[in-house]
Structure formats: structure tokens, C-alpha cells
Image (cartoon, grey):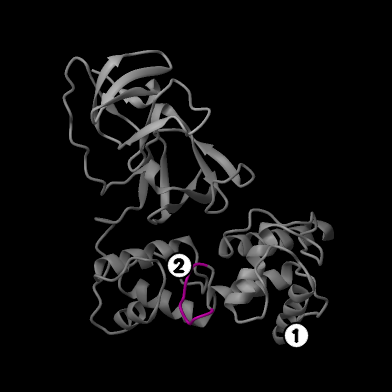
Amino acid sequence: MKNNRVWLRRALAMGLCLMLLPAAAALAAGDGVLRPGDRGDSVRSMQSALKALKYEVKVDGVYGPQTVAAVKLFQQRSGLKEDGKAGPATLEKLSLDYASRDGVLRAGSRGSEVRRMQQALKDLGYPLKVDGVFGDDTLSSLRAFQLRNGLTMDGAAGPATLQKLYSGKALGYAGDKGLDTSAVVDTQRGRVLHLRSSKSDSGRANIILNIPSGATVKVLAKGGEWTRVSYGGKTGYVRTGFLRFPTTPEKAKVTLKAGQAMVATQPGRALSLRSSASRASSKNIIANIPSGTVVTLLDMGSTWSRISYGGQTGYAMSGYLQIP
């Protein structure tokens, strides 16, 4: 039982750290401790947090002597055991300090100032629990407050947001109208969307689960490139371009004629027009055709199609073409 409680405390500390230091996909050691000699994204994330807090450390993903010294100094100032190892207690304290590093209240912040902000939001009718913990419900309510009061909807309570909140002239809760609190996965050809633990799609190690095309997700923090969502009891990041929001304008309907096709890649992504039916190299790319462009269809094949675009003729992947 004691071991279970210890494991649970470590898991909570690790979860909090990974939420606030998003580049980390997993801790290096199985016991939840980062040690001298460790390498990887987890070390890099810790170094980034230390650097943001003005500790002298190089962000290189290597737990070397300089990182050990920075961790020891942080532990000393935080009243923690000065062993130079980043265990759950050190990572949790580092996460909390990082979240409130510039006086801005954001996801992960805790304490009396968070409670005061929550109470002010609740007094204005915004739905949230007043517990002093800046969690997902607080984030959603704060974004709704910012939208309602014409503020930058970044989900962080900086000087402008707090000044408006405590001014006595702030507008109260008026529902979720105009606020993207949910979204539908809108991938091409029924492909799944990866929910990731960090804002990176350079590999598969940070994939939490796959979300089916057409599924509805809860939006926690909408961003230009990445959006933090909740799905299936898990929270993580997905590419914003693969989500359709309630406020997303309806796509204009295009009527295709015989002999025409439309490029059906994700918004903002181009389709390569190639001189040969092969994508083994980028050397045969003639042009990049924007999503939604109508092209002339010369020959439709199961894998490759021959098309004409901008006065040039070549080959494009058939799966990315919409035909009448």
C-alpha cells in the first residue's frame, strides 16, 4: 500500500510537470527521476524551465555538470534536498514556479491569486470551481471571459485580463456563443488524428492515442498550429489544421465539370505535381498546388493521376484529388 501511494505521488508530479513543460514526452528513468548523465527531451524541457527562471544552464538535452549545478541551486532556493537529481518533488516545484514565472496566471498555476481570480470569474457567472488550481475548467472560463470582454483569448491571466476582471465593469458570462469549446476531427480520406503529449509530430513516441475522423473533441486551448484537446479521457495536442470548429466558415461549394478535379489536401497543405509517377525523391516536383485548386484531369489512375495545372503537365497522387 505504501509503495502504491509513493507511485501515485510520483505520477501526479510527473503529470503536472509534463503538462507545463510540453516538450517532454516521458521521463528518462522508470522511477520518475532525472539524473546526471541522462539525455533527451525530458532533460531539455527541465533545462528550458530552469533557463526561463534565470538559472545559468545550456538547453542541450544533456544532464551535465552545469545542469547539476543549476538543479542544486534551484533545490537550495526552494528548500528541497540538494542532491542535484530532479525527482518528483523538484519537478513539481519547478513546474509551479515556471507556470507563474512572470506574474501571469496560466494553466498549472496554484495559490491564493488563482483562487481570487476564480472567485471573481464565478461572481460574474462563469462556470468553474474555486479551488486555487488553474485547471481545464478555469482555462475554459477564462477564455470565455476574454472573448466576452474583447481581450486577447490566450487563456492566460496577464495584467490586461486581471485589470478588466477586477475593474467592476467586466461583462458576465453569456454562454459559449462564439467560443470554440469543441471541434470535429476533419482529416482526409477517413484518416485518424494523432493525440500527442507534446507539440511535435517528428516521431511516434509522443502519440497518446488515435482519434477517428469525424469524432468530436473538447477544446481546451485553441492555437494557430497546435490545439490542446481532451478525448477519451486523455488530454494532449493535435494539429489545428485537422479540426473543424463551430466558428469555422463553411467551405464554398465548387461544381466540377467533366475532365476536372479539385485538390483535396488539408487546408494550407499543397499537393506536389511531379514529372514522374514517383515520390521517392523531391527532385521530380514541378510545382506545388494549393488545397482547393481545380485542375484539369487527363488520366485517372488508382494511385497516380496525370493532370494539368498552370500550363504544366505531370502526375499527382490520386488519393488527394476530388473528382465529379
Q: Is residue 103 magenta?
A: yes
Note whether residue 13 is visible. Answer: no
The residue labelled by disc 1 is 76
Mark 1 nearby-residue class (10 Å; few <14, some 14–19, many ≥20): some
Q: Is residue 268 above or below residue 301?
A: below
Mark 2 nearby-residue class (10 Å; few <14, some 14–19, many ≥20): some
Residue 280, position as x, y percentages in the image: 53, 28
Q: Is residue 136 magenta?
A: no
Please identify the quadrant where the C terminus is shown: top left
Residue type of the residue flagged with mark 1: Gln
Residue type of the residue flagged with mark 2: Lys
Q: Which residues are magenta?
A: 101-107
For mark 1, give the secondary structure.
Answer: helix
Residue 264, located in which quarter of the rendered image?
Answer: top left
Q: CA distance from mark 2 to mark 1?
A: 34 Å
The dominant secondary structure in magenta is: loop
What's the residue at 39%, 33% (across, down)? 214
For mark 2, give the secondary structure.
Answer: loop
- Which of pointers 2 and 1 indicates the residue nearer the eye? 1
Q: Earlier in the sequence, mark 2 or mark 1?
A: 1
Horizontal side of 266 relative to 32 (left or right) equals left
